[in-house]
Amino acid sequence: MHIARLIRIPCAGLIGAVAAVATLSSAGLAAGTYDINVVLPLTGSAAFVGQGQKDTLSALEDQINGTGGIGGQKLNFIFHDDQTQPQLAVQLTSQVLGSRPAVVMGSSLVAMCLAMAPLMANGPVQYCLSPGIHPKAASYVFSTSSSSTDQIAAVVRYYRMVGWTKIASLMTTDASGQDGDRSLAAVLQYPENKGKMQLVIQEHFNPSDVSVAAQMARIKGSGAQAIVAWTTGAPAATVFRGMAQEGVDLPVAPTSGNQTFAAMKQWQAFLPKHLILASALYPPHPPGVKLDPRVDSAQQAMYATLKKRGLKADNMVATSWDGGLIVASGLRKLGSGATAAQLRQYINGLTDFPGVDGIYDFKKYPQRGLGQESATVTAYDAKTVSWTWLSQPGGAPLGK
């Protein structure tokens, strides 16, 4: 991806969308509120991701305001729709920056976050709600949840330990797929995998493609025992349809961005029988999994808050709840007049912050706070509409 080129693309159809939020953005802090602008794909191919994160942050807003808000002011998330388009994410962010905020949250996918990031070189803080970007240490950009590399590491460890050592990859040609290619290549070089795990075939497709029949036919004949298809949203559905049409009955792991109840319901007619979902630690865990009691406490508080809005925890929680909690914690400590530099320093200094996905240590894991121990592997249980843990944190199968 060439970020500068994205910024220069003329797109008259987007100007109206940007103008529509100008009044909200330039209003700054409304009386009695502390406003945080959030750029999300509320429409377009990743709408289920953005809508889920919007619902989650709105629930978090309830929890924060129910416990004092931000220095006596009510926290108020203002949402802007980038329509799953990087160039619109850039234009919306540029508009928001006119009010000189300390922080901007979003967007939800790699492409939009990377397009926004150059605008944050000197602040404000950007809290990207995708685990698929890997910000430079000491920058103003932070990435949420366990990283895509750590999630793939958990999936590959699970595959290896259950005996699926020959794997196929099917990636999109966009930024998410490129990150998947790099992360998988790195994970296969880990000492535990080198010489034991074999990538027998690599396939790619364009995110706008409506069929992957040819790629699936080649995977079917490759001898692969499992698939890593690191893609989110509509392209993931294309993969699942292709598997059904070509009779490919193999375990398949897409990105954790698909770990949403909305997606599972929408795709229930063609979901693979062996759908492997990388996950952060937020889902209710079985007795055999022991987490830090403070993490358990944070999770219980979150479940209760979500329940009041009729929501259940899925990956949209994993990619937005803790990020919002960390930002709110910083603003509470620093005051509503905190600068971007002060907020960045606060986050960088956190070493023992309990969230729903683990204990955050930004000195050990710069710009993210979480490591491999905060990634696990789950499956979807359609009967109970819930996520079933398949592994311990880190990816080792339960019972091993």
Image (spheres, rainbow, N blue to C red):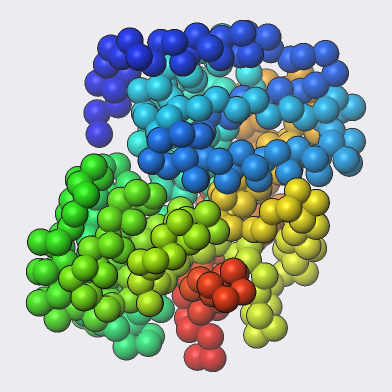
Q: Residue 376: x and y, percent?
A: 51, 70
Give the residue drawn at x 35%, y 14%: 13
Picture layout, residue 169 above or below residue 323: below
Which of the two residues, 177 or 205, is positioned nearer the viewer here?
205
Residue 83 to residue 215: above or below: above
**Can residue 224 be seen in the rendering of this structure?**
yes
Count the marks.
0
Give coordinates of residue 84: x percent, y percent.
40, 34
The relative height of residue 304 versus residue 44 in the rendered view (above or below) is: below
Q: Is residue 166 left or right of residue 333?
A: left
Q: Is residue 146 above or below residue 338?
A: below
What residue appears at the point 25 percent right and 45 percent down from the top-left corner?
Answer: 207
Look at 23% across and 42% down and name the residue there: 208
What is the x, y in percent for residue 159?
A: 35, 79
Q: Give residue 66's position: percent from left, percent from top.
A: 88, 40
Do we see residue 186 in this rendering?
A: no
Where residue 201 sits, quadrant-wise, is: bottom left
> Relative to residue 28, is residue 30 drawn left or right?
right
Give the residue furthest to the bottom: 399
